[in-house]
Image (cartoon, helix red, strand yellow):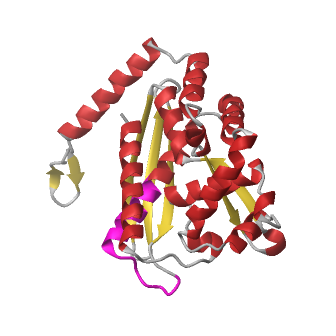
Amino acid sequence: MVTNENEGLVPQTVLEPSALEVLNRSEIDIQIATAKQYPRDLKRVLGNVRAYATIDEETAEDCFYALKRGKGSDENLIEGISVRLAEIFASCWGNLRVQTRITGNDGKTITAQGVCHDLESNLAVCVEVKRRITDRQGRTFSDDMQVVTGNAASAIAFRNAVLKVIPKAVTKKVVNEIKLVALGQAGDVESKRIATIKWFNQRGVTTEQILNYIEADCVENIDAEKLLTLRSTATAIKEGTTTVQETFGAKVADSAGTAAKIKEAAAKTAAAQAEGTK
């Protein structure tokens, strides 16, 4: 009871936790208890990551992204672990809860939130990712493209949250091993080079723009390292970390086929992300 000077005793309302909150707390408590009972084996975890990520060269290549930021002397190539590899880490790490959701849409940007909780160490991390939903002319994306952008933001939030929880000191060795597989055999470079250039050409990027991007004077000088950078850039575009326009300033054909591919890629990202949270 709360005392009011003018009215005497006033009943105080006590908010009871909802049934869903009680259920969630109970579920987390059980998962923490299970995690303590069956702790992860780091050697086995890294072995499983290595096995999944290097099952073939294409999978290994999809484990990395690359994109350039800045202009002129301030231009930097940013490389990192892709959503695909973050999903592999999450599934192999074990005793992990990961959740994403869209928390805001102000008409200019979509905000996605990713939460990762290590049930063994009881470390929980929450990150937010914003993605623009307007073009360079300030026009708002269509509803469908806003959904695609939201899915991409959620996937990136998933990756960032997972990589905040899983220590880099533990994963850096296996990441280097995966990169060696991604580089592939010397004999594969020519065929991959042709396929990669074709992939970008179909999205409005000229061969000259590609060469300028990776700082090569001709197609024949695109070696394994430069090719991996180029294919990692393609991964960044496919998972929504960047776009063709942001990277190359190129125009993308607004065709039904292109739109269908974008939606299909976003659907696969969302499905894979959902699978990783189980």
Residue at x 76% of width, y 70% of height:
212
Check the image and report above or below for 127 versus 244. above
Task: Using the image, determine if residue 130 lies above or below residue 168.
Answer: below
- Where is residue 47 shown, x and y percent of the image? 59, 21
> Is residue 164 at least partly visible in the picture?
no
Drawn side of residue 113 relative to residue 41, left or right: left
Magenta: predominant secondary structure element? helix
The answer to whether 1 appears left or right of 204 in the picture is left
Split into 4 quadrants, where in the image is the N terminus?
Answer: top left
Q: Position of residue 159 (x, y in %)?
A: 52, 46
Total tally of numbered discs in the picture:
0
Location of residue 63 (image quadrant):
top right
Does 148 lie within the magenta span? yes
Name the residue at 37% across, 38% down.
275
Instruction: Please tell me whether residue 173 belongs to the stretch shown in magenta.
Output: no
- Image quarter where the C terminus lies is top left
Residue at x 63%, y 33% (from the top left corner): 167
Q: Which residues are magenta?
A: 136-154
Residue in the foreground of this view, choosing between 1 and 124: 124
Indicate left or right for 95 with 64 as reference: left
x, y percent for residue 38 = 45, 13
